[in-house]
Image: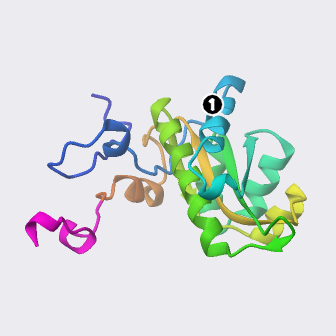
Amino acid sequence: MNHEIVQKPADTTANLHPLVRDRWSPRIYDPEHNLSMAELESIGEAFRWAPSSSNQQPWKLVLLTRGSELFESIASTGLTGFNQTWAPDASGLAVVLAAKTFEGKDRKMAETYFDVGLASSQLVTQVESMGLKAHFMGGIVPEKIREDLKVAEHEVVCVIALGKQGSILGKDEAIVSRETAPRTRNNSSDVYVIDSIL
């Protein structure tokens, strides 16, 4: 077992699929890894084929690869706080956008975000299936991202870091402590109820 790469499977006795059980959000990425065009297409297609209410598909995805001008701009000024210290090492950034209107009418963002959330989750599951990792980021500067991408007709929902998980060796203690902190969730009884045990 490679102890340089942190693993955090879900702490549960339930029989979960490995794509669900092993998914977590690392902050250390391999800065030498690059996403291939085939991988980018698979990620984009997973997003495109997500469930959508009435098939309205109120979403758009922009995939940026490390080294490109847009990646560098958003990684340096479109992210906030701690995200700026680790996200530039990711192989790519997926910018998730939600349509503001549909058929000329303003959309209810709560309804739109449900569909966009499904698409984003499907994207992350695809990334996990490819042996890569993803990390959702809400610490962003939407106005800056919207300006860079010229997408005034969309809301910026989040940015997702994509890439190959990196080693904790030689990394600053601040990020290693976050990387190795236990993965936790609320108690199952606080989250879901099964009617047969009511």
Q: Is residue 83 left or right of residue 128?
A: right
Query: Which residue is depicted at the point 28% across and 62% down?
Result: 184
Q: Where, quadrant-wise, is the N terminus in this rendering?
A: top left
The three-letter code of the residue at mark 1 reads Ser
Q: Where, quadrant-wise, is the C terminus in this rendering?
A: bottom left
Q: Nearer the viewer, residue 45 or 197?
A: 197
Q: Is residue 42 above or below residue 60?
A: above
Q: Position of residue 79 (x, y in %)?
A: 69, 63
Residue that mark 1 sits on = 42
Whether the magenta-drawn stretch holds residue 183 is answered as: no
Q: Nearer the viewer, residue 83 or 161?
A: 161
Q: Position of residue 143 (x, y in %)?
A: 81, 71
Q: Is residue 189 above or below residue 181?
A: below
Query: Which residue is depicted at the point 46% across and 51% down?
Result: 25
Write down the quadrant of residue 49 in the picture: top right
Write down the quadrant of residue 137 in the picture: bottom right
- The residue segment tinted magenta is 184-198
Disc 1: CA contacts within 10 A as few (<14), some (14-19) or many (>=20):
some
Q: Is there any visible trace of residue 151 in the rendered image?
A: yes
What colouring does the structure picture have?
Answer: rainbow
Q: Position of residue 126 (x, y in %)?
A: 52, 37
Query: Which residue is depicted at the point 32% across and 30% down?
Result: 2
Whether the magenta-drawn stretch holds residue 192 is answered as: yes
